[in-house]
Amino acid sequence: MIRGRFEEQLTELRDDILRMGKLVEEEMLLAIRALETLDTALAQQVATVDAGVNKLRFETEEKCFTVIVTQQPAARDLRAVVSVMNIIVDLERMGDQAKGIAKVIPHLKQQPQLSPIPELKQMGDLVLNMLRQSMQAYASDSVTLARIVANQDDDVDKLYAEVFTTLVHQMAADDSPEEIKTSYERLRVARELERFGDLATNIAERVIYRVTGQLKELNTDG
């Protein structure tokens, strides 16, 4: 009976992680759409979803403490609980990256003409896919899929480098403080997306730790 209850608690924690991942995905999707359309109403919705992410993080953390205190898990079971505690922190931070993107929308909306930066869209699509795959890897304990997530981080870093170069050159050519600020804010968006990808990689590392017991940094280029 004790083991049965423990398995139920682990399943509940897993479900909480997957639910939190869905909320973060929704949050980033809203932020990206707001960026593409410069829709301040969508940007405001990001903060609402983020509040739900934060609430779930703390609720799940409390459940983890309860499991540790009442069940005193050892070895593999303890790894599972510790992995949850780490993943919820990464997911909360990913929500913060989405919120950071939303915060630049009001300023960008004031700019009548913004030259497109295709790499930003590519970064957004890629990091969202990394989040989805990291959640799939967690749900299925797939080390293979976790490694695929980590490998994609190199592509995110390359795109970020391209955006960085483009916007630094743009800032050098800007004629006014307002134009420089606009370029800086777009660079900030790229940085938020790049960090989002890093955090998805962190989750992939935790999946591997949960399954194998080996905690190893998968991508050291970023």
Image (tube, helix red, strand yellow):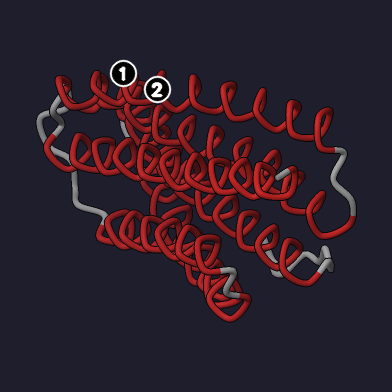
Amino acid type, mark 2? Gly
Residue labelled with disc 1? 48
Q: Is residue 220 visible?
A: no
Seen in the image, is 17 located left or right of residue 215? left
Q: Is residue 88 visible?
A: yes
Q: On residue 18, which mark appears?
A: none
Distance between the Cα atoms at labels 1 and 2? 7 Å
- In this rendering, the answer to whether 102 lies above or below 158 is above
- The answer to which quarter of the image holds residue 109 is top left
Return the x and y of residue 26 as percentages of the image width and height.
29, 40
Residue at 89% over, 57% down: 75
Return the x and y of residue 198 as percentages of the image width and height.
59, 54
Return the x and y of residue 170 as percentages of the image width and height.
36, 46
- In this rendering, the answer to whether 11 lies above or below 105 is below
- The answer to which quarter of the image holds residue 66 is top right
How many other residues sit within 10 Å of disc 2, few (<14), some (14-19) or many (≥20)?
A: some
Q: On residue 52, which mark appears?
A: 2
Amino acid type, mark 1? Thr
Residue at 32% over, 35% down: 27
Give the position of the C terminus as an image quadrant. bottom right
Residue at 28% over, 36% down: 31
- The answer to which quarter of the image holds residue 59 is top right
Return the x and y of residue 162 as percentages of the image width and height.
44, 63
In what element is the residue under mark 2? helix
- Between circles 1 and 2, the one closer to the viewer is 2
In what element is the residue under mark 1? helix
In this view of the protein, which residue sits in the foreground, 118 or 72? 72
Marks 1/2 in contact by CB < 8 Å: the verdict is yes
